[in-house]
Image: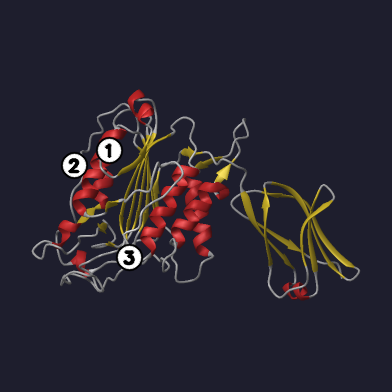
Amino acid sequence: MSDAIIWKDQALINSKKPAAHAVVIGVGDYPHLVGGTGPLTDKNGGLRQLSSPPESAFTFARWLLDEFHNPGAPLASLSLLVSDADGREFEHPKLPSPVTPATADADATVDALRAWKTLGDSNEDNLMLFFFCGHGVARGLEGLTLLLRDYGAVPAMPMEGAIDFSAFQRGMAQCAASYQCFFVDACRQVSDIARNTTESGRKVIQDDINRPFESDWNYAVLFSTVEGESAYGRRHKPSFYAEELIKGLNGLAANNRNADGEWRVSTGELNSAIHRGLSQRGKKIKNPAVRLVEFEFHMPRREPVIPVTVFCDPRSDHELANLFCEQNGNVVDSRGPGVDVWVTELTYGTYDFLARINTRIGNRNSESVLPPYREIKIRVAP
């Protein structure tokens, strides 16, 4: 079993019942890229140090331990690999003591991914969860190489410190687990690092056109950006993608259409929620790309809280209007006159919205508020 595993339910693993297995990787410290502590590789592509990936990895690992919920496939193992200039420990109430994550270099990462695949082989109904945040480079519109901590450590073969993600993901068809999610928070820019060589990183699992199992291969690959574009992190904070991913998982990507009324997150609706969230972050941030089969894999532990945008028509009335949100005759939230639209957050349900300018009133009654968002336009009577 991999040294990268920081938490596991050994009894569930031994039972070989359906379970979820997660591997989380965050690479921020690159000794052989610009600003690193080691010799600079001449195949550096101008890439620099990152502070967001360790934060993103820690945040997603905490989310898995706190919030992931799938009664049909409970979390059974969590592997964490990090490259962080500060060398921080990971703490969580479910751990007996703080742990130092495994170093996210190529050897440790390949070992961890192969061990992860082996855990997935125990049951065809297993769910596999993969998260990576760090540098990525592409040769063209096909393929993606993920750079690990020791990229460039071997001058004659810099790519020994990277993995060929596209080949790895294809190889996961050879894993018995029939449900697989890959969350990839990395640039996909075409770079000379990848374009000027036939090397694309270490191979993790050999692919094969034949899947040797009865079950279908249900996979979802949710990228943080489109082919040929950059992804964006923030200094010492989780990336925009990581934040929107977690918001989606916490309910903005949920639906309760099934007869039991339970909230569930599916791969397709998660992508839509991430798409919506990133689109609000600024023009530089490109919408994410995706390759997926639609399936449900997570049930939020509480009802979603939905962002609601309320605005007047014409919008010039914002500066004059008092805005109200009511439910069952009670005021839930309100806002006085202001220049901008009113953005509030409401739990799932039916609400009445009202705008008042002196004695003039406009309203929208019995409006349903449901994920991933809702917009309400109110025209005030003349």
Q: Amino acid at mark 3?
A: Gly
Disc sitting over residue 228 in the figure: 3
The residue under label 1 is 117
Q: Are marks 1 and 2 in contact (CB under 8 Å)?
A: no
Indicate the secondary structure of the residue bearing disc 2: loop
Residue at the location (55% across, 41% down)? 300
Residue 364: image quadrant is bottom right
N-terminal of the pair, mark 2 or mark 3, is 2
Left or right: 279 with respect to 77? right
Residue 160: image quadrant is bottom left
The residue under label 2 is 206
Disc sitting over residue 183 in the figure: none
Residue at the location (34% across, 29% down)? 13
Q: Amino acid at mark 2?
A: Gln
**Image height of 92 relative to 126, above or below:** below
Q: Residues within 10 Å of mark 2 (few under 14, many from 20)?
A: few
> Could you give the CA–CA distance between mark 3 and mark 1, rounded to whole angstroms?
29 Å
